Amino acid sequence: MQIKYLPACIIFALLIVLFFSVASPVQASVCRNLQGHQICIISIKRSAKNYWEYRAIVSVDGVKSPLEVYNCREQNKLEANGKIVPFADIDAGRLICRYFPKKS
């Protein structure tokens, strides 16, 4: 009688193992505290042509900003409206340029 249910128990156990072994996709972000502000890099891409430039979406204290281009060589950023602004004291650009240093 117990042998009759053995294949069903094995299949059930395998289904449970498969269910818990598959990880669901999670969007991870890099967060750091900088002078009392929480800065999170939500998404980031390095420029293929200019290795010192990063296209990133960040959030500062939970407020998400649009896509901006951070220039680590010139220490400025190109905002979504086309305006070039130098990095401020509390700026995600400083975090990006420090966190992703230039590879030699």
Image (cartoon, helix red, strand yellow):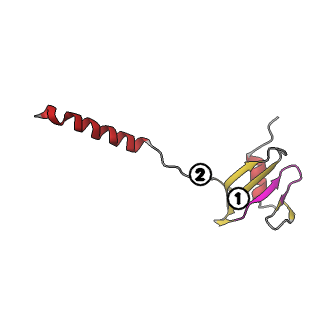
- Going from N to C along the chain, the mark reached first, 2 or 1, is 2
Q: Quadrant of the C terminus?
A: top right
Q: Is residue 37 visible?
A: no
Indicate the position of residue 5 as horizontal and vertical percent values.
17, 37
Residue drawn at point x = 71 percent, y = 51 percent: 44
How many residues crowd mark 1 within 10 Å: few (<14), some (14–19), many (20+)? some
Real-space CA distance between mark 2 and mark 1, rounded to the nearest whole angstrom? 13 Å
Q: Which residue appears farthest toward the top when viewing the image?
A: 3
Q: Which residue is mark 1?
A: 57
Asked whether 65 or 86 is in front, the reply is 65
Picture quadrant where residue 89 is located: bottom right
Residue 75 highlighted magenta (yes or no)? yes
Residue type marked 2: Ala
Indicate the position of residue 73 as horizontal and vertical percent values.
87, 49
Indicate the position of residue 22 as horizontal and vertical percent values.
45, 43
Location of residue 45 with respect to 61 vertically, above or below: above
Q: Which residues are magenta?
A: 65-77
Residue drawn at point x = 75 percent, y = 51 percent: 96
Asked whether 62 or 64 is in front, the reply is 64
Residue type marked 1: Ile
Indicate the position of residue 30 as horizontal and vertical percent values.
64, 51
Asked whether 38 or 76 is in front, the reply is 76
Across the whole image, how many numbered discs are drawn on residues?
Answer: 2
Picture quadrant where residue 69 is located: bottom right
Q: Which residue is mark 2?
A: 28
Residue 1 highlighted magenta (yes or no)? no
Residue drawn at point x = 79 percent, y = 47 percent: 47
Dot 1 falls on a residue whose secondary structure is strand
Q: Is residue 26 left or right of residue 73?
A: left
Dot 2 falls on a residue whose secondary structure is loop
Q: Quadrant of the N terminus?
A: top left
Q: Is residue 55 visible?
A: yes
